[in-house]
Image (spheres, rainbow, N blue to C red):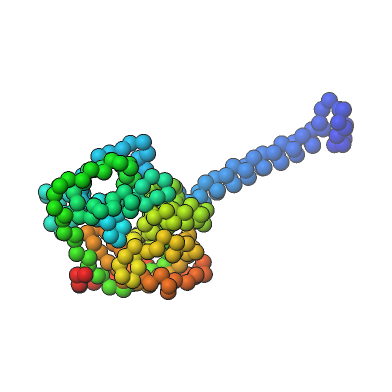
């Protein structure tokens, strides 16, 4: 019998059968190797957490500017300079917490919410109608320290998704979602390409940036120049939104921060 195979024949010729087995084994090996390469090359998920469905009770001081924040007192043994932990506040879904905490600036409150955290960034999704204010007098807010001007390269994201509600919560695949979150009042966050530095973005006067001001720059590689500010353990970047411009994808990373110590109070 020769190697010519006829469909109605009961057996495949031996030489042809050996050749087909080799081809199948090679293709199976290539498929496994390709799958492993795709897994290795995939961006790993960030170590971020959203405690969905696990509300906690929090007590602290409300700070409304530039973005809603809850100051939670740290244990007595904590250094005096870090007396409070600062938790950004947002509402359910794609909404900020401005309306929820209106008129409570500097007031002591208790509230319920779900924790969102990634690295050193912490946020609470507040349950509406859970905020209860005490009759104590308003507390003076911490000074804001100027750390000098920097030029940093990275990406503008919405802080809620980036810190844990979505994973990875950044990049072009997340652009539409991030734009809607920022339009709803979620604080904008600037993350450097190496992921080591995060800044809340504020305008030239240190106020919250307009909700739709950054829409066209979300999830784009961008270089920003501005003044770094420190309030407690929160770092902010004061920028002029009018100076922003689109930057090529192959921009040089320039995320080194100044090594000088805070030199002025604002």
In the image, what residue occupies the spot 24% across and 52% down?
Answer: 104
The quadrant in which residue 4 appears is top right
Total numbered labels placed on residues in the image: 0
Question: Vertically, is 185 above or below 135?
Answer: below
Spot occupied by residue 146 in the image (x, y as percentages of width and height) = 24, 70
The quadrant in which residue 112 appears is top left
In the image, what residue occupies the spot 31% across and 38% down?
Answer: 55
Question: Vertically, is 154 above or below 115?
Answer: below
Spot occupied by residue 172 in the image (x, y as percentages of width and height) = 51, 57
Which residue is the extreme one toward the top? 10
Residue 237 appears anywhere in the view = no
Closer-to-camera residue (147/125): 125
In the image, what residue occupies the spot 33% across and 53% down?
Answer: 98
Residue 218 appears anywhere in the view = yes
Closer-to-camera residue (108/4): 108
The quadrant in which residue 237 appears is bottom left
> The N terminus is located in which quarter?
top right
In the image, what residue occupies the spot 50% across and 50% down?
Answer: 42
Question: Vertically, is 217 above or below 62?
Answer: below
Spot occupied by residue 247 in the image (x, y as percentages of width and height) = 49, 70
Closer-to-camera residue (256/5): 256
Question: Vertically, is 186 above or below 128?
Answer: below
76 to the left or right of 52: left
Spot occupied by residue 120 in the image (x, y as percentages of width and height) = 30, 53
> The C terminus is located in which quarter?
bottom left
39 to the left or right of 190: right
């Amino acid at each position: 019998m020769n190697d010519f195979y006829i469909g109605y024949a009961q057996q495949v010729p031996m030489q042809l059968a050996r050749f087909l087995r080799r081809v199948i084994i090679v293709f199976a090996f290539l498929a496994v190797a390709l799958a492993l390469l795709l897994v290795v090359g995939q961006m790993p998920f960030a170590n971020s957490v959203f405690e969905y469905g696990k509300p906690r009770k929090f007590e602290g001081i409300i700070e409304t500017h530039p973005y809603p924040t809850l100051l939670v007192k740290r244990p007595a043994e904590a250094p005096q300079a870090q007396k409070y932990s600062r938790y950004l506040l947002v509402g359910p879904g794609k909404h900020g917490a401005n309306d929820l905490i209106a008129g409570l600036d500097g007031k002591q409150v208790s509230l319920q919410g779900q924790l969102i955290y990634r690295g050193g960034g912490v946020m609470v999704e507040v349950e509406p109608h859970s905020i209860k204010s005490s009759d104590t007098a308003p507390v003076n807010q911490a000074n804001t320290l100027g750390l000098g001007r920097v030029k940093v390269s990275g990406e503008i994201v919405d802080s809620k998704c980036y810190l844990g509600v979505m994973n990875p919560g950044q990049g072009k695949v997340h652009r539409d979602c991030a734009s809607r979150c920022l339009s709803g009042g979620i604080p904008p966050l600037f993350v450097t390409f190496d992921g080591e530095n995060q800044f809340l973005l504020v305008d030239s006067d240190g106020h919250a940036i307009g909700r739709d001001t950054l829409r066209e720059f979300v999830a784009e590689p961008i270089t920003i120049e501005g003044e770094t500010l420190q309030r407690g353990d929160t770092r902010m970047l004061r920028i002029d939104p009018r100076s922003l411009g689109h930057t090529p994808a192959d921009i040089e990373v320039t995320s080194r921060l100044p090594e000088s110590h805070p030199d002025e109070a604002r």
